[in-house]
Amino acid sequence: MDATDNYGEIREAVARLCARFSGEYWRNLDREMAYPEEFVSELTKAGWLAALIPEEFGGAGLPLSAGAAILEEIHKSGGNAGACHAQMYTMGTLLRHGSQAQKESYLPAIANGSLRLQAFGVTEPGSGTDTGSLRTTARLDGDHYVVNGQKIWTSRAEHSDLMILLARTTPLEEGMKKTHGLSVLLVDMREARDKGLSIRPIRTMMNHATTEVFFDNLKVPAENLVGEEGKGFRYILSGMNAERILIAAECIGDAKWLIGKAVEYAGERRVFGRAIGENQGIQFPIAKAYANMRAAELMVREALRRYEAGENPGAEANMAKMLAADASNEAANVCIQTHGGFGFAEEYDVERKFRETRLYQVAPISTNLILSYLSEHVLGLPKSY
Ligand SMILES: Cc1cc2nc3c(=O)[nH]c(=O)nc-3n(C[C@H](O)[C@H](O)[C@H](O)COP(=O)(O)OP(=O)(O)OC[C@H]3O[C@@H](n4cnc5c(N)ncnc54)[C@H](O)[C@@H]3O)c2cc1C
């Protein structure tokens, strides 16, 4: 199977599972800002979150396009994979750069669901998008690292056993490239809670289980270093194409759900004695959103095709993420407009999806930074920052 396969059977099975989790299920969680424990547990039990883990470590060994199909289907059903999607791409850091011993000790447990790798600690309040200027430090002291600092927007930290952490292991000196001297550590948060690691939830406009994480002389065994010391930035970068593509697939799923809802409502709602969908003023914005979604979907497929051919599809992965996030944002806007006042009522789930899909203009990478990447690396324009 590869990017040209549309995974009909997988999509049907995921859709069947998602059908058990209604709009009401997601709405209630949203209201309480609660984690979708039951949904994530069912998805894990069915093996979908382990789709990309190689068979030798207990996963299904499927290519990235299968992961994209699974996540798209969750979003197309009106659900939200934000509670668990990170496992698909953070696992890749361990798989590509971890030692054989690390892979053997963690991946089978992640695949069978007994261990959760859902947290990814890169962003800091002081550094933002400028990852190289992060300030969290990990100092080697005998057989362990001592970690101090703070991360922000570390999503799912309260619902994960492990965290992939990027920290500075070599102090930044004059003339040194700031992306050097950073290292990836695998932090076992089960042991670390209240022994130097504390987590504080951040309430956000959508239900995303995101947090701030504080490190105060946290000891992490030296054997939890992933790959070589000082090369962490490169390891994190190497996972970004997969992350961008998977998030783009979620946006395509959101756009399909939103367009479907808009079409349905436009056909049902009668005003001035006829269905509002008979008016071209209602039809055209929906048709435009559909065309833009389909165009973005083609870019997602192209990024997947290149990724699976072993290329480095930095440009396509970034464009796919940007175009898909734009398409889902447009579809959300059109869906609200089509619903008129009812678009704002919780029971239609439209306003929830509107809030949820808005995130992807900013995270995991903001649109400006994608445009800046394309300007510099594809178009050859001068570096702007
Ligand atoms: C709900 C949520 C979940 C998240 N989950 C995680 C997670 O699990 N792990 C993690 O590590 N991070 C996570 N993030 C962080 C996310 O990746 C960042 O918010 C995002 O990369 C933007 O960084 P920032 O918020 O620091 O914005 P800033 O870097 O402060 O930028 C602010 C604005 O300025 C723009 N900007 C900055 N520099 C330039 C420039 N040179 N040119 C033009 N425009 C510029 C940006 O595009 C942005 O719009 C999450 C964020 C959110 C909101």
Image (cartoon, grey):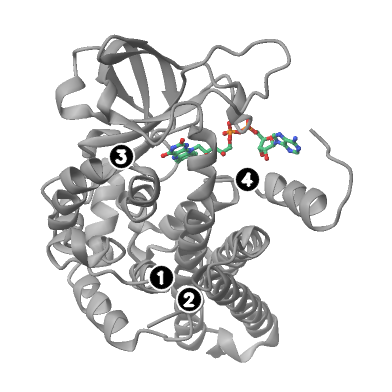
The amino acid sitting under disc 4 is Ser
How far, Cα to Cα, is label 4 from label 2? Answer: 22 Å
State the residue at coordinates (64%, 65%).
316
The numbered mark, 4 or 2, whose residue comes first in the sequence reads 2
Indicate the quadrant containing the N terminus: top left, top right, bottom left or bottom right. bottom left
State the residue at coordinates (24%, 61%).
50
Question: Which SS class for mark 4?
Answer: loop
On the question of residue 353 being in view, the answer is yes
The answer as to whether callout 2 falls within 8 Å of ligand 1 is no
The numbered mark, 4 or 1, whose residue comes first in the sequence reads 1
The answer as to whether callout 3 falls within 8 Å of ligand 1 is yes
The numbered mark, 2 or 1, whose residue comes first in the sequence reads 1
How far, Cα to Cα, is label 2 from label 3? Answer: 26 Å
Tell me the tag on residue 304.
none
The amino acid sitting under disc 1 is Glu
The answer as to whether callout 4 falls within 8 Å of ligand 1 is yes
State the residue at coordinates (20%, 20%).
192
Q: Circle 1 sits on which residue? A: 72
Q: Nearer the viewer, residue 134 or 204?
A: 134
Question: Which SS class for mark 2?
Answer: helix
**Label 2 neighbourhood size at 10 Å, few (<14), some (14-19), many (20+)?**
many
Is 36 left or right of 212, judged from the image as shown? left
- Above or below, comparing residue 139 to residue 348 in the picture: above
The amino acid sitting under disc 3 is Arg
Q: Which of 36 and 188 is in front in this view?
A: 188
Is 279 left or right of 76, judged from the image as shown? right
How far, Cα to Cα, is label 2 from label 1? Answer: 9 Å
**Label 3 neighbourhood size at 10 Å, few (<14), some (14-19), many (20+)?**
many
The numbered mark, 3 or 4, whose residue comes first in the sequence reads 3
How far, Cα to Cα, is label 1 from label 3? Answer: 20 Å
Q: Circle 4 sits on which residue? A: 366
Q: Circle 3 sits on which residue? A: 156
